[in-house]
Amino acid sequence: MANHNTFVVLALMALTSFVAYATDPTQLQDFCVGVKDPKEALFVNGLFCKNPMEATPDDFFYKGLDVPGKPNNLGVNVTMVTAMQVPGLNTLGISLARIDFAPYGLNPPHTHPRATEVLTVLEGTLYVGFVTSNLPNGGNKLFTKVLNKGDVFVFPQGLVHFQFNVGNCPAVAIAGLSSQNPGVVTIANAVFGAQPPISVDVLAKAFQLDANVVKFLQSHFGTSS
């Protein structure tokens, strides 16, 4: 009986271990196409590493985040500080962004497929929010808040979110992200600006729009930067 119990315990431990590791590691890029011959191409999920004995303080340093960015046509500018700007961030799983808003500027609905975002308002007043994934009833719940200087808000990984400057003065925020390469998918650009374009029939049915409206949106987002 003792041997039987021991076998059961070991089997359960093995099963638990399998379940715990039966998943892919968190990716640092959208995809990594495998090749049979490394001579064809060679990329890694992240960056190659420098010899630690050759590292310098500058590998962990970035200067200039105090300088405001020039807002785009939506009235927003995002200055990212990732492992591309600070090599020492590689493999540490974090990054940073400064977000500058013109009066009534909008950081439009978007997602970060690989990161949760923590936003802190340094100046101004922002209306922010995120939408849940599909709920059991088929709906999507919106969480919103008006943030003032010093306020903090969290946007969970992968969920659609936005930030809107509701004041008539510029606003500034700092965002921390839980990935060295969080990625960004701007919803309208991805749907209506994809190249080659998504079928008009698909989008017209999905959004319950007239085909001519879809074509107009595609022409607008397809030519935007």
Image (cartoon, rainbow, N blue to C red):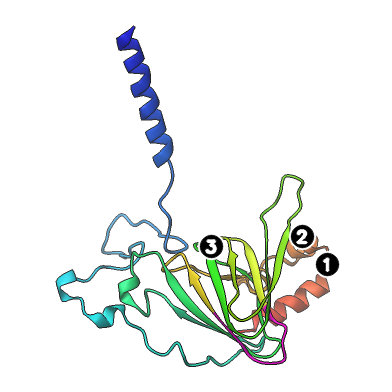
Query: Could you say where residue 224 lies in the image, as x and y percent from the top left?
Result: 64, 84
Of badges 3 and 1, the one in the foreground is 3
Instruction: Say whether residue 149 is left or right of residue 136.
Output: left
Q: Is residue 126 left or right of residue 61?
A: right
Q: Residues within 10 Å of mark 3 (few under 14, many from 20)?
A: many
Amino acid at pointer 2: Ala
Indicate which disc, 3 or 1, sits on the residue closer to the N terminus.
Answer: 3
Q: Which residue is most to the right?
A: 210
The residue that disc 3 covers is: 113
Span highlighted in magenta in the image: 164-173
Q: Residue 36: give x, y in percent of width and height.
A: 31, 54
The mark found on residue 178 in the picture is none
Q: Is residue 164 left or right of residue 152?
A: right
- Which corner quadrant of the image does residue 161 belong to? bottom right
**Mark-to-mark CA distance, 3 and 2:** 22 Å
Mark drawn on residue 206 = 2
* 145 shown above or below 221: above
Is residue 51 something that shows in the picture? no
Disc 1: which residue: 209
Between the residue at mark 3 and the residue at mark 1, the CA separation in whole angstroms equals: 27 Å
Considering every residue shown, the one lying at the far left of the view is: 53
Q: Nearer the viewer, residue 6 or 51?
A: 6
Q: Measured from the top left, where is residue 222 in percent x and y?
A: 65, 79
